[in-house]
Image (spheres, rainbow, N blue to C red):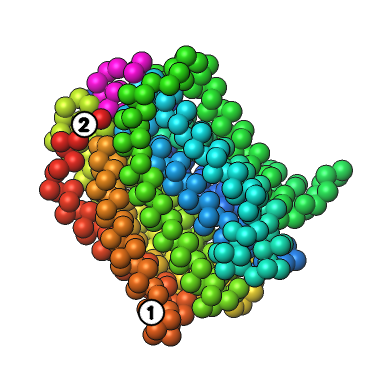
Amino acid sequence: MSKYISFLKKALSGEEVDYTKATIRSAVLLLAIPMMLEMAMESVFALVDLYFVGHLKESGYAIQTVGLTESVLSVMYSIAIGMSMAATAMVARRIGEKNPEQASRSAAQVILVSFIVTFILSLFGVIYAEEILILMGSKPDAAAYGKEFTRIMMGSSVIIMLLFLINGIFRGAGNAAIAMKSLWIANIANIILCPVLIKGFGPIPALGLTGAALATTIGRSIGVIYQLYHLLVADTQIRILLHYFKPNFSVIQSVVKIATPGIFQFVIASCSWIFLAQLVATTGGENASAGYQTALRLMMFFMLPAWGLSNAASTLVGQNMGANEMLRAEQSVMKTVKYNVIFMVAVSLIFFLLGDFLVGFFTQETEIKDFAKNALHIMSIGFIFYGIGMVMINAFNGAGDTWTPTWVNLCGFWLFQIPLAYFLSKHFGMGPKGVFISIPAAETLITIVAFILFKNGKWKTVKV
């Protein structure tokens, strides 16, 4: 037991480790433990908001607004994740080459590009918040109710981007503990502020749904301040000096080359989810939409830790390729697949056995609960495939081969999932249930194709 406790402490401490030399099992677990906890904290943001707004007077409107806003924000997340992919791949490769200074310079250039792009896009979200909700399928009165929430969340996109991006930098360097701690700090602040700002406390007025947006934004901002301290001030392996932010167009070109397909990769997936959310709202109404959004938040609570575990493959592939250890890179991916499958089997059992209890924690409205339980049970059928697919996608991204998963996502989501969801829900009259069925069907197909392409090995030839 003391051996396991000591290993856990090492994983959580942020102690520097040469992941190209440690045993593959240790390397995977040392990275996976803090990465899983980091992603679990990211999912807590949505669940905390959902819990408190689910108990507001207009809970149907509130839950729908949170869900639809998150769906739109997923496009911003896609940009942040795409940029963080570039950061992770470039930083991991330079660390594998034992060149931390160049890793730091690359990180600074990714931050510079990401900040400019995200700032411009966030302005549109602030200006057209109500119109965005209506476009997503919200009724005018529901959109008017939730527009301030959406406006604040869209306006905080730069903070969201920095949180994702800087954590990607630390993950690439192998310091997943700092990434984890930044999310813990942000969540603690959010959990404290949510009830205070939503319900009011002392001189602080009850802000309702708007309070949820403010709490989340402030919490994330505190997390970013913690990240910037370790990036700019603290003595860590990645240390960015201010003059590193001076534009270096050769590095920026490399960033764009890796990040652009990475962004498209997740925009493709995000737009698919947006279409599905709109399809559920139009075929099933407000209760179906609220139930679906509740199920998605619950699913993401468990899926994000699995994504965190799969992030270990990204770092290990990048660092081992930098050290010219190609066989070790592939072995690290397969070991990560094994652990992720075990985790996803456990999640499937939880959803089948405790789905009713989990949904009831967020809403007591019978019709919303029924839709949420139905969605959970259907979507969880494909969880094992989700787990394998995540690792494959992250392995490609860690190698800097962001085009392969982009094409896989394009075919799997837009050419298969969306048409399937449309025909099942509308032409076959299955409504929201047809949408739910299309999700595990598409993820299974994507996983099979990604696995075949990974074993083909073309990713081993990518230069970063």
Q: Find numbered disc 1 in the image and state the secondary structure of the residue it sits on.
A: helix
User: Could you say where residue 75 lies in the image, as x and y percent from the top left?
Assistant: 47, 50
Q: Main secondary structure of the magenta part?
A: helix
Magenta segment: does it hold 221?
no
Q: Does residue 385 sit above or below 310 in this rendering?
A: below
Q: Give, as a three-letter code, the residue at label 2.
A: Lys
Badge 2: few (under 14), some or many (20 or more) residues near its Cα, within 10 Å?
few
Front one among 297 and 462: 462
Q: Give, as a three-letter code, the residue at label 1.
A: Leu
Q: Specify the quadrant of the image occupied by residue 170.
A: top left
Q: Specify the quadrant of the image occupied by residue 327.
A: top left
Label drawn at residue 424? 1
Label drawn at residue 74? none
Q: Find numbered disc 2 in the image and state the secondary structure of the residue it sits on.
A: loop
User: Could you say where residue 331 lies in the image, as x and y percent from the top left?
Assistant: 18, 40
Magenta segment: does it hold 101?
yes
- Location of mark 2 (residue): 463
Looking at the image, residue 452 sits to the left or right of residue 30; the answer is left
Q: Tag 2 or tag 1, which sits nearer the N-term?
A: 1
| Residue range corresponding to the magenta coloring | 91-102
Tell me which residue sits at (16%, 54%) in the image: 452
Looking at the image, residue 143 sits to the left or right of residue 373; the answer is right
Badge 1: few (under 14), some or many (20 or more) residues near its Cα, within 10 Å?
many
Q: Does residue 99 sit above or below 5 in this rendering?
A: above
Front one among 396 and 82: 82
Q: Specify the quadrant of the image occupied by residue 388.
A: bottom left
Quarter holding the C terminus is top left
Front one among 7 and 387: 387
**Residue at the extreme right of the image, as rendered:** 203
Tell me which residue sits at (22%, 59%) in the image: 448
Tell me which residue sits at (68%, 68%) in the image: 140
